[in-house]
Image (cartoon, helix red, strand yellow):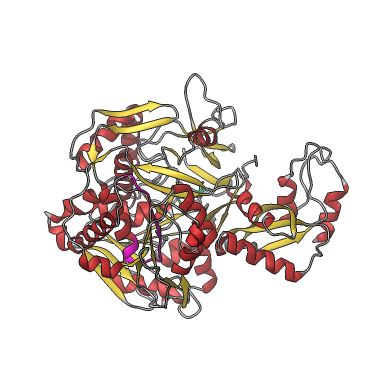
């Protein structure tokens, strides 16, 4: 386990209060508002959430029990019946929001589409019927492997409508990675597109699905539904593959939402952990709906007139919670953009802000660092005066990037919500409420009301202010993951027993290092396990190691993160080769391509270093700490005497 590194941000003392104009129009206007709310929620979290669930969501039937907590397994709103697709769509149709824009979509090549709540509802109902016609029943899993088009959101909502848990697989994952996930989830149907557009190129998606399913590779998959996006020629296997538009045209638009149990599974989302296999994080219906609804509403202090834009991909939890479910449950307007800044159009984000008058903009630190590199001229040449609130997510934001974001994009007037959370937490855990909490560059500030966050040592004892420790949560919350799909034991071990429970008191271990300062502000310092964060994408080092070792030339591989100014971290791989294989630059390139084939371009190693041997303890464990030092060109820190072969480090250094 790595020690949290707190040096870098210990000296950050700047404080930014929201302007009186901003605070005055906010739901929560002062730190007293926040403190009172936080205290009330902490005194009785279940009562706090129950009151909100009653007020904010539609229930076909009210729950019998708010919280059933059999550590580490939680159930929320037990006995309650609801449907998140109903909460995101149907309930808005009887209000003026019926004809409000639900989704605004901007394509990479400049085409656009707006779907009102009524239109979105109609399409979701049709696709829900298409799925039913393909034999999908409540409880069946549906894989979604899509580009950033409205059909991705429609597919998710259609699944939710009929009670079929979806598993969205990021369109940047390779056929191999797709196959692993479809197999684990035993998906019955896959929804995909012929391809997508990325950086002015076509990304073939259907061919990857074909590859994953070849030779009965995923026996559970019976049908594939294909959105036509790029109009490239794709293979359509008769009986198995169906065009979305053809099936939609035949489908009825009448599809009442299934009455779901609050604890019925809503989706599985795969994420990287410390062992090789990605884990399927399970989220259920009622608690997830409530928590994403409230965190979206309060953190973005959403107004009915706002145009809200989150730049994430729907393939990640941020897209699930804060492009689709949270915004739509609130009846907000959520903008979806297919493109990314690219050489042919580096200012495209600011064009989109200007074109739609975006009011709330939510992105990742890695994107902000890329904007800084591209220069102020691009944003300065556009009208960004519509922006009133900014957000960041995915990795710690360095104070310089925060300051640039605040000054150049926010014009010095927009509060920044730095939201700390995870796939596992479902929604924001530590974040400012922007009208109430003054911000400090680099700090996610205070826990959301109802979230009992703390910083502790490995025995679970709280550490003193400003001392590094491990970030934990001491009480269940509505959108917490329920389990690892098919593996309760892994769930228990990874998250709830890492810090041993004391007197039956279980704490959730997030895997992040953190520090709390004298004002109660949290500073998240990054992962303390074998997970690395490359451009805000979460990758398991073991996952990349398994990919490398699956190449015939590789005997052994160890992967660590190396600090990178743009990406946050980059993948650095140490590789030993099989007996008669010779190191060469060609082989390095081949191994990089191999990782892309096994996982996807996001995992491509930035550097591979060949070695004769890896530093190991006498019991044969690779000493990653040393490798991290070597990768960053630092002196090897700590005691090397436990090493089996002292000459290994010397050789590795020479290898540089
Ligand atoms: O290390 C933390 C980092 O991202 C991890 C969660 O990754 P993932 O499940 O992919 O979800 C990303 C989007 C929610 C965390 O364990 N992280 C996320 N947000 C922040 C962050 N680190 C620091 N500050 C943040 N705001």
Q: Is residue 437 left or right of 92 when viewed as pictured?
A: right
Determine the image quadrant of residue 413.
bottom left
Regarding residue 353, the answer to whether it shows in the image is yes
**Quadrant placement of the C terminus:** bottom right
Residue drawn at 52 percent across, 25 percent down: 501
Question: Residue 189 location, x and y as percent?
Answer: 37, 56
Q: Is 589 inside the magenta-drawn segment?
A: no
Instruction: In this rendered view, identify the residue nearer to me: 474 or 195.
Output: 195
Examine the rendered structure and indicate whether residue 533 appears above or below residue 340.
above
Question: Residue 499 location, x and y as percent?
Answer: 56, 30
Examine the rendered structure and indicate whether residue 456 appears above or below residue 268.
above
Regarding residue 565, the answer to whether it shows in the image is no
**Quadrant placement of the N terminus:** top right
Determine the image quadrant of residue 588.
bottom right
Question: Residue 275 location, x and y as percent?
Answer: 60, 44
Instruction: In this rendered view, identify the residue nearer to me: 395 or 212.
Output: 212
Q: Which range of residues does the magenta coloring cover?
A: 139-152
Residue drawn at 39 percent across, 72 percent down: 350
Q: Is residue 628 left or right of 36 when viewed as pictured?
A: right
Residue extending furthest top? 503
């Amino acid at each position: 386990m790595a020690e949290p590194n707190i040096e870098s941000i210990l000296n950050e003392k700047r404080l930014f209060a929201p302007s009186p104009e901003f605070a005055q129009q906010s739901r929560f206007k002062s730190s007293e508002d926040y403190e009172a709310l936080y205290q009330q929620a902490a005194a009785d979290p279940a009562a706090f959430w129950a009151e909100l669930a009653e007020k904010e969501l539609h229930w076909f039937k009210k729950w019998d029990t708010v919280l059933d907590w059999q550590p580490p397994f939680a159930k929320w709103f037990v006995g309650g019946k609801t449907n998140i697709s109903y909460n995101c769509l149907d309930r808005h149709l009887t209000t003026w929001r019926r004809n409000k824009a639900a989704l605004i979509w901007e394509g990479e090549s400049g085409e656009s589409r707006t779907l009102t709540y009524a239109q979105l509802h109609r399409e979701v109902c049709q696709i829900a019927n298409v799925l039913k016609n393909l034999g999908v029943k409540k409880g069946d899993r549906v894989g979604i492997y899509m580009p950033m088009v409205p059909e991705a959101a429609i597919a998710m909502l259609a699944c939710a409508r009929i009670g079929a848990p979806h598993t969205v697989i990021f369109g940047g994952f390779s056929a191999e990675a797709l196959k692993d996930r479809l197999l684990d989830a035993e998906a019955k149907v896959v929804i995909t597109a012929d391809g997508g557009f990325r950086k002015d190129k076509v990304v073939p998606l259907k061919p990857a699905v074909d590859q994953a399913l070849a030779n009965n590779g995923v026996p559970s998959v019976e049908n594939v539904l294909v959105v036509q996006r790029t109009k490239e020629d794709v293979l359509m296997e008769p009986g198995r593959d169906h065009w979305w538009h053809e099936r939609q045209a035949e489908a009825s638009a009448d599809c009442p939402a299934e009455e779901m149990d609050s604890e019925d599974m809503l989706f599985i989302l795969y994420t990287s952990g410390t062992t090789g296999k990605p884990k399927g994080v399970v989220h259920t219906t009622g608690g997830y709906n409530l928590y994403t609804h409230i965190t979206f509403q309060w953190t973005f202090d959403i107004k009915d007139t706002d145009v809200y834009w989150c730049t994430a991909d729907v393939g990640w939890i941020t897209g699930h919670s804060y492009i689709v479910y949270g915004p739509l449950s609130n009846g907000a307007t959520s903008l979806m953009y297919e493109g990314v800044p690219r050489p042919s159009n580096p200012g495209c984000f600011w064009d989109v802000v200007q074109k739609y008058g975006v009011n709330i903009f939510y992105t990742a630190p890695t994107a902000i660092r890329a904007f800084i590199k591209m220069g102020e001229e691009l944003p300065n040449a556009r009208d960004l005066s519509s922006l009133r609130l900014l957000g960041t997510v995915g990795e710690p934001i360095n104070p310089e990037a925060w300051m640039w974001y605040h000054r150049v994009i926010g014009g010095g007037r927009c509060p920044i919500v730095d939201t700390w959370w995870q796939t596992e937490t479902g929604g924001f855990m530590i974040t400012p409420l922007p009208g109430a909490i003054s911000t400090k560059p680099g700090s996610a500030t205070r826990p959301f009301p109802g979230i009992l966050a703390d910083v502790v040592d490995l025995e679970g004892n709280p550490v003193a202010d400003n001392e590094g420790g491990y970030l934990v949560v001491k009480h269940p919350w509505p959108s917490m993951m329920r389990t690892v799909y098919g593996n309760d034991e892994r769930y228990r071990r990874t998250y709830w027993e890492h810090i041993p429970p004391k007197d039956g008191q279980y704490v959730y271990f997030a895997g992040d290092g953190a520090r709390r300062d004298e004002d109660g502000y949290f500073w998240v310092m990054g992962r303390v396990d074998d997970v690395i964060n490359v451009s805000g994408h979460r990758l398991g080092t073991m996952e990349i190691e398994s990919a490398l070792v699956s190449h015939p030339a590789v005997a052994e591989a160890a992967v660590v993160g190396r600090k990178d100014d743009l990406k946050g971290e980059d993948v650095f791989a140490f590789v030993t080769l099989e007996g008669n294989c010779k190191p060469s630059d060609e082989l390095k390139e081949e191994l990089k391509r191999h990782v892309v084939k096994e996982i996807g371009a996001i995992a491509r190693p930035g550097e591979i270093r060949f070695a004769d041997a890896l530093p190991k303890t006498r019991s044969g464990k690779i000493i990653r700490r040393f490798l991290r030092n070597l990768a960053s060109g630092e002196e090897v820190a700590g005691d090397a005497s436990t090493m089996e072969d002292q000459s290994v480090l010397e050789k590795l250094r020479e290898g540089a």
